Image (cartoon, grey):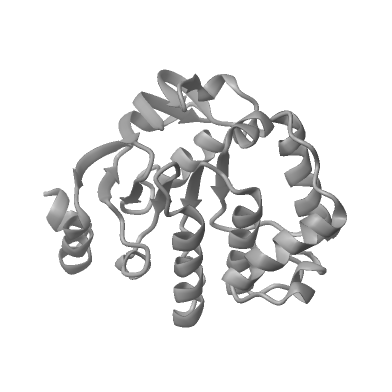
Amino acid sequence: MLEITNLHVSVADKPILKGLTLSVPAGEVHAVMGPNGAGKSTLAHVLGGKPGYEVTAGSVTFRGEDLLALEPHERAARGLFLGFQYPVEIPGVSNVQFLREALNAQRKARGEEPLSGGEFLKLAREKAALLKMDMEMLKRQVNVGFSGGEKKRAEMVQMGILDPAFAVLDETDSGLDIDALRIVGAGINAIMRSADKAVLLITHYQRLLDVVAPDKVSVLADGRILETGGPELALRLEAEGYDAVLA
């Protein structure tokens, strides 16, 4: 579903990704771990289409199409979802308004009919229940006044409503307590565990992987994928640290 080949990316003329190659087929949850400054968030931002990241070499193919040639909204309409490490606040815009507009914009781009208000609210209630989030929360302004855990749960509700084919989740476990981690992890499993979907899960810690059991784990360091293995690789990293494993 996602094929990254020899990807080189610079930010302000500084090389960050230095020949990254990674393949994530449909039906797979692929975890990417690595030390600070390795290029994990850069990878997520490039896939999402964030400005300021210069691709100097390599290619990214998503569902057979050149992802890098698409604008961010086009990538979203094709089925790509980016979960942020630090979800932003949007004062003056309610979650319900934001999500209905986003969903119907994507449906229009795919040639589908928009959902009515009633149809959308039914869908929103269903997805909010997966994340144990009260609908009153979704009536509030996007992330304004939310705790870290509430922001991440609201973002997973967004993912459930938009129903992407591929999710790039950048340190979704950041700022979550034990209970919120379990709820968010269960939400990821319920929404994205499917033979026709896939997840690229960026994380520092094993704790999220205890809930969202990955099919593969890759170690990203110095802008490259240095090792790929099964879930046991994450356990090694947790036990021995990055320096020991990379050595």
- Residue 79, picture quadrant: top right
In the displayed structure, would residue 17 be above or below residue 244? above
Q: Is residue 229 left or right of residue 222?
A: left
- Residue 142, picture quadrant: bottom right
Q: Residue at x 27, y 51 (%)?
A: 215
Q: Residue at x 45, y 75 (%)?
A: 182
**Residue situated in front as seen by the camera: 203 or 136:** 136
Q: Is residue 5 left or right of residue 108?
A: left
Q: Is residue 223 left or right of residue 117?
A: left
In the displayed structure, would residue 190 be above or below residue 116? below
Query: Residue 71, position in %: x, y?
Result: 65, 26
Q: Residue at x 65, y 29 (%)?
A: 74
Query: Residue 209, position in %: x, y?
Result: 33, 64
In the displayed structure, would residue 165 be above or below residue 194? above
Quarter of the image with the N terminus is top left
In the displayed structure, would residue 71 be above or below residue 32? above
* Count of numbered marks: 0
Query: Residue 240, position in %: x, y?
Result: 15, 65
Query: Residue 144, position in %: x, y?
Result: 76, 67
Question: Does residue 207 appear in this view?
Answer: yes
Q: Residue at x 52, y 25 (%)?
A: 67
Q: Is residue 151 left or right of residue 35?
A: right
Question: Does residue 95 appear in this view?
Answer: no
- Residue 137, picture quadrant: bottom right
**Residue situated in front as seen by the camera: 126 or 154:** 126
